[in-house]
Amino acid sequence: MKFYKFYKSDTYIKDIHIFKRLFSFIKPYKWKVALGVLLTLSISALSAVRPKLTQVAIDDKILHKDVGGLQFIAIILLLTLILQGFIQYISAFLTSYIGQKVTFDLRKKVYSHIINLNVKFFDKTPVGKLVTRVTNDIDVLFEVFSSGLVTAFGDIFTLFWIMYFMFSISYELSFITLSVLPFLIYATAVFRKKVRASYTRIRNLVANMNTYIQEHISGIQIVQLFLKEHYTIKEFEVINREHTEENKRSIFYYAVFFPVVELIGAIAIGLIIWYGGGKVVQNMLSLGVIISFLQYTEMFFRPIRDLSEKYNILQTAIASSDRIFELLDTKNEVVDPPNPKHINDFNFKIEFNNVWFAYEGENYVLKNINFCIKKGERVAIVGATGSGKTSIINLLCRFYDVSKGAILLNGIDIRELSQKELRSLMSIVLQDVILFSGTLKSNVTFGNDELPDEYIHSAIESSGIEHLLKTIPEGIHKNVSEQGSSFSVGQRQLIALARALAYQRQILILDEATANIDTETEHIIQTAIQKLMTGRTAIIIAHRLSTIQSCDKIIVMHKGEIKEIGTHTELLQKKGIYFKLYQLQFNGERVIEK
């Protein structure tokens, strides 16, 4: 009854469901898999024939002193070994090919899914765990698709062939051999339960380790500045030790299981020698039958040991697959409508109508936001940190959807547009510029090979990085290291501006684009920004109020609400929040100058 419940458990049903999903990735290669299975069947059949030939050689040839017949049997044995080796070579090559193709497809699917998830997902998910899914977890599946899946079929069919030949030779000895199976099945069931739990914990610990390494190497300057190298090493040692101990635990299960299988196999061999030997003494059984049965018994437990090894791979793969499919099942909270509307050209206005927004629950960071931006206007959004400025930009780019209200573009709710079309109207320059490994040119074009050269040269000239390129022998083809660490903050800002210019978008968003840079670089960037904003609708988030005085409209935010809207002069005359911000900043700059 317990055995029945085990195979009807939720874990078993879940495993079957995971396998069905994994097999869906094999469908494009089903004929290659079928060929691999056919080759494996041939190998298992050839393996099972050899003990039968041994029996024939002893009973029919050696005992009858038939030298010619014995030589013929020896030649057949040699040919079966050569043929088996050749088929194994083809099978190994084919299964490895299938494994590489399937893991390539799966890795592509997982990465594509991650890239298309909305920003909210990345707010809650560590990067290290995602890297583990795309690399380590999928690498584990390669073993299943290459050596595990098809060869497991071979082991199963080898068992069937062995049982067929055993029963064709002697029913009695066959039942004696199979008498130990209940003990083997019970041991395998216990082993399965223990190893499954262990490998799930191991995969989780690997993800935690990758996350920790990624975070602390990315923040290496902070770690070293605060002299926390020893502290982080101790923390990592705890995670590493947990991973090591769990691996040792899984090794312990194998160290117990394999000797148990060997012991059960030895008991079966002992029973055959005891019972079969007595029959040989009584001339009721031939010596060739006993010898072939001993070979078959050893062969019988070999596939079982191999299947246990495959089970090791399988349990690791199930744990990895579970995590991969959990990621693939993550739904996007920001989705395109079934029949999106289209905007061929932005020629009207951006409008926020009674917009409310919360990142979690009803903890609103934006409350009743109402304003409009006409085509060609330059609008600044100012306010203290945490007032909701960046949240407005996130909603306009539709990285998140509004909780209440609507954002209209040319009179159309942006939720009725496709995200691709909406974002194709916008360029954004962030305070923390992200550069990617490659060249300066690839960072400006960002992989768009269709950008005309005149766009690229115009962007370089207008952005102010032309003088930077003159100091670099490689020019625009200079390699960019990870995150652009070989460039200063100001240089990275100029490259980001060049990228925004090259794409010739109609709406320009600048999020603190001149923060944390020196005055000279700021002047260069401001000149580039003025060129960039020409003929475009611009939305500027800025702490330095001196940079936005010429804007057509300034929106003042405070605790998620709009408190004031007007020009620089109008807001100073109101003597409200903007006036206080301006006075604080102006007096601060005067103190610094003195």
Image: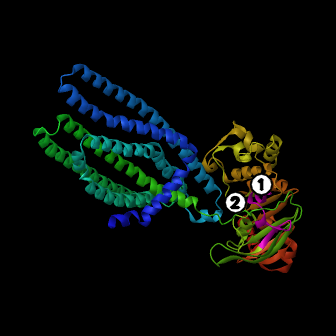
Q: Is residue 328 above or below residue 51?
A: below
Report whether 16 appears left or right of 337.
Answer: left
Marks 1/2: CA distance? 12 Å
Label 1 Cα crowd, 10 Å radius (few <14 / some 14-19 / many 20+): many
Screen quadrant of the N terminus: bottom left
**Label 1: which secondary element:** helix
Along the viewing direction, whichever of 548 and 117 lies nearer the viewer: 117
Q: Earlier in the sequence, mark 1 or mark 2?
A: 2
**Could you tell me if residue 471 is visible in this image?**
no
Q: Position of residue 463 (x, y in %)?
A: 79, 49
User: What range of the chain is rendered magenta?
Assistant: 406-425
The image quadrant that residue 82 belongs to is top left
Q: Which residue is mark 2?
A: 431
Does the image show residue 172?
A: yes
Left/right placement of residue 487 relative to residue 43 reads right
Residue 216 spot, x, y in % from top left = 51, 57
Say which residue appears at 86% left-offset and 71% top-offset. Answer: 567
Q: What residue type is disc 1 on?
A: Ile
Query: In the rendered image, which quarter is residue 551 located in?
Result: bottom right
What mark, if any, has residue 525 been given in the picture?
1
Residue 151 in magenta stretch: no
Please name whichever residue, 130 or 577, is drawn nearer the observer in this view of the structure.
Answer: 130
Secondary structure of residue under mark 2: loop
Residue situated furthest front in the rendering: 284
Q: Position of residue 177 (x, y in %)?
A: 24, 48
Q: Nearest the camera: 131 or 61?
A: 61
Q: Is residue 518 left or right of residue 321?
A: right
Amino acid type of disc 2?
Answer: Gln
In the rendered image, the vertical position of residue 35 relative to residue 578, given as above or below: above
Taking the image as shown, residue 249 lies to the left or right of residue 527, namely left
Location of the C terminus by quadrant is bottom right
